[in-house]
Amino acid sequence: MKYFAALHAGFSRALRGRPGAALAAGAAILASLAAGTAQAEPQGLLETIHKQTTLSSTVPDNGDQNPYALAVSPLTAGKVQQNDVLIDNFNNATNLQGVGTTIVDFNPSTQKLTLFASVPHDLKECPGGVGLSTAMTILKSGWVIVGSTPSNDGTTGTKGAGCLLVFDMEGKLATVFSSENINDPWGNMAVVDNGQSATLFVSNSGFGVGGAEAVEPPVFKQATVLRIELAIDPGKPPVVKNETVVASGFSERADKGVFLIGPTGLALGKDGTLYVSDAIGNRISQIDDALTRDTSAGVGRTLTADGLLQRPLAMVMTPAGHLLVTNGLNGKVVEIDPATGRQIYARWIDTDKAQSPPGNGDLFGIVMTPEGDGFYYVEDDMNTLVIAK
Amino acid sequence: MNAPKPPDEPVSGEGPGALTRRGFLKAGGLAAAAGAGLGAAGLAQAALDKGKPPAAPAASMAKAARKAEPFFGEHQAGIATPQQTHTYFAAFDITTNDRADVIALLKTWTEASARLTQGDTAQPLDLNPAAVAQPAAPADDAVLGGMSTLDDAAPVAANNASGGRHAAVVTNAAVGAGAAGGDTVTASQAASAGNAAAGVDAASAAGADSAAGKVRAAAAIDSPASGTAGNDGYAPAAAPAYSAAPFEDSGEALGLDTARLTLTFGFGPSLFTRDGVDRFGLAARRPDALVDLPRFNGDQLVKDKSGGDLCVQACADDPQVAFHAVRQLARLAQGKAAIRWVQAGFLSMPADGGTPRNLMGFKDGTNNPPIRNAAAMDKLIWAGAEGPAWMRGGTYTVFRRIRITLEHWDNTEVGFQEAVFGRHKYSGAPLGKQKEFDPVDLAANDAHGNPTIPDNSHVRLSNQASNNGAQILRRSYSYNDGVNFYAERWPPWRQELEYDAGLLFVAHQRDPRTAFIPINHRLAASDLMNQFTTHVGSAVFACPPGAKPGSFIGAGLFEA
């Protein structure tokens, strides 16, 4: 029981002002652990998490809200120190979605938040303008690539196709990628970064999607996963060499509350299998040979569905090769062993009872710490960056 | 600039005439005052005693001033005054560029406020309007009532001779800037009669019936049209202008208790400079502490609910009395200042005299500085020698219109609500304590080492111990303005008709730079309550010290 007591204490500390959730969430963990023995080796990462700490507000001076993407810098260059966390914002100061234009930089050493980049919302090079999404990465070569899923009025009724924006490490816009294959790059990217070349996987959730006026906006099965191969010459911005749709036919729809629902999380296994969180299908799909295939695998094969999943969003892979996926409809992160498809357990990392169930709608981006001993995530309810480890 | 003249009337309620009038009216009421003339005689005598022209045949229909707060004093009332149950707040923009107009307005407001807070009408009432009508007036005037005609010759003398109503009219003319604002009817009637272009330095009786109704118009043809240029704006007898006053007081507070009415005035940053322009020669006198409030995280400020050159906060135990007071002052400001935004508020007091609750159901104001502790008030609330002399004894007041998503709040558990506040809902005690006034122990931990009062709870973030000892005197009111369509800022982002209700947050302090601003920065960044609250209006005002009898609110600001 000593083990549990420590875990419980760690969890309770993590509540950060939401003690009312302790019992319910504690019970959930107990139930999750009941299957194994208390003294066993950790089955995964989540049970090793002892503390959650709110690190910073993510709101820059211009008031942008709703943090979405997270990326940890692999290098020190320009405004950014190695291991800094970049966070982008999807909403503007009036909290309209799809019009956020800022990326902030949190330095874990100084605990300071600074503005990394800001672009005009009406950037001509990006079809429909700029509303920064959950797609963001920092390449070793010193380029920050971030998706735009733009709107003009905060609804999908005015959304554009968007683009991928490329910034240098000073936060200056260097180039913009747009093409017929890019339509609202929405979820977090999976990336293979080889220095002078890189491969990005981007989920596109905008094809065919219109306004959200209907009581139940129609579901379109047109979302894709696009593989983008980049060539990066020293000192020059990346250039797109190839675009390949490796998956297609995922469900997507407009939503009054959360703007878009579609495939969101992407994570790449060591064997080249790409895992895709299918938010509407409430499942994790796997796309075989994602790095090499030259045709679409359709919606792939289902790795796991339902169970602990509640609208799976952003996804990341742990050092042990497990998937961590944030739930959109509660404040939980679910750990999955992709080798077996087993949902190992879930942890309630956002227990904010301002939402029902607690944390509903609060989670989105997630990224591993550089050490791999925990993860950063954002809380949309409070516009904060949190670390769990 | 001319030296300000003292108000014509004893306005403090301290003079013998005033006491006589009030005592009489209390005893005899309206009918006796109108009929017998005993009160009128007494009043006339009182006015004569002060060396003034006779003011009125019957000046006032005072409310019974059973519960009156003093108007004059070291500090303005309505700040440290035990809180009344209702407020009507109004921010004004000044519509003149003439410094003398501003002074005149403040004098008029002072005079009216001193009357209103003591249970009088804003201006002396004419209780016998029929006697005012000129004998030459056609019969239909009497039917219509309310409008008077004026002889071509010696209009000022005629006014004075006809008594209080016209005295009030002249005062109003000075206040109302001639043909502008509420006097427009008169001016247009004059124009229709062809007199406006004549430019004669006398009032003329308009001979034509107006299209709007058969009223006789008297027009002020005095030049310049504003009627106030070139003097200090407060010399009614010197201004040979005439305009019809629609009424001296709208009357809806007649017979009501004074209800502890207080009227508190403040000067906004834009009084000193607006868009970089020093309209009134006051820029150099702006206190350092009167800063423009910075943007706070989550602010969704609406321009139409923010700012203001001047403010009037009426507080009373009767909403009709509070609104009545602002309504009179707004009318008296015509031509000089116009309402920019208003907010009514309420705060129902528990029967046991305990701390009142806000719309979230929690006690609000428990941890306020002690208003009866002069030393604490001097330290925390009243401006001292660190700023300009004209503000000494005043305070700096922040108003924030904070919408609360009550629908969202009402769907959360009480235990969670308590975590948000850091207090128990029903007792008001800090979390972990039993009684409302038990000290807030921010160091207390539970058995697992977690803070008993959560890190991002409202009490912890706003507590003086978390803010270098900074404290504010909160004197807030709830508001409820019906429903509007809202898209919530928080998951799950409901979009529907919701209450436009919340809190008119009012905070007094010695210096916002070390009080409201740092406290609210912490709250805006981290307060769990932010998931339910949105700041949609904001204003800051320098509320000068109380006026002395014979002087006016803010007089020190305008002294050379």
Image (cartoon, coloured by chain):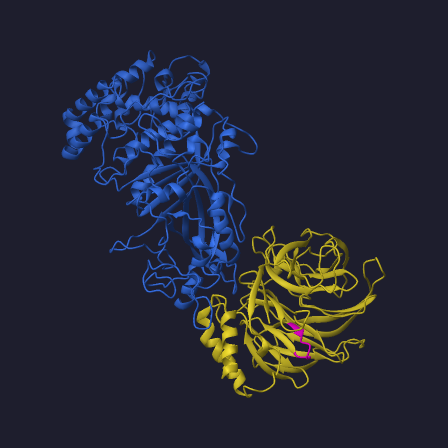
Chain colours: A yellow, B blue
Relative vertical location of residue B68 with respect to residue A311 in this rendering, above or below: above
**Nearest to the observer: residue B513 or residue B491:** B513
Q: Nearer the viewer, residue A176 or A237?
A: A237
Front residue (pair B284, B210): B284
Quadrant placement of the N terminus of chain B? top left
Task: Identify which residue is drawn at 52% across, 61% down.
Answer: B490
* The furthest residue to the top: B153
Prevailing secondary structure of the magenta residues: loop
Residue at (23% x, 36% y) in the render: B63
Q: Examine the structure image and report whether residue A342 is included in the region drawn in magenta.
A: no
Residue that sits furthest to the right in the current view: A233
Where on the picture, by quarter, is residue A332? bottom right
**Residue situated in front as seen by the camera: B109 or A131:** B109
Q: Is residue A247 left or right of residue B221?
A: right
Residue A125 seen in this snapshot: yes
Residue B299: x percent and y percent?
52, 51
Could you tell me which residue is drawn at 54 percent across and 88 percent down? A35
- Residue B491 image position (x, y, % from top left): 52, 64
Confirm whether residue B216 shows in the render: no
Task: Report the span colored magenta.
Answer: A315-322
Left or right: A153 with respect to A143?
left
Q: Which x, y percent locates residue A243?
A: 80, 68
Q: Position of residue A282 (x, y in %)?
A: 60, 77
Rendered-image quadrant of the C terminus of chain B: top left
Q: How many discs mark residues in the rendered view?
A: 0
Q: Is residue B331 left or right of residue A335?
A: left
Q: Residue A228: name its quadrant.
A: bottom right
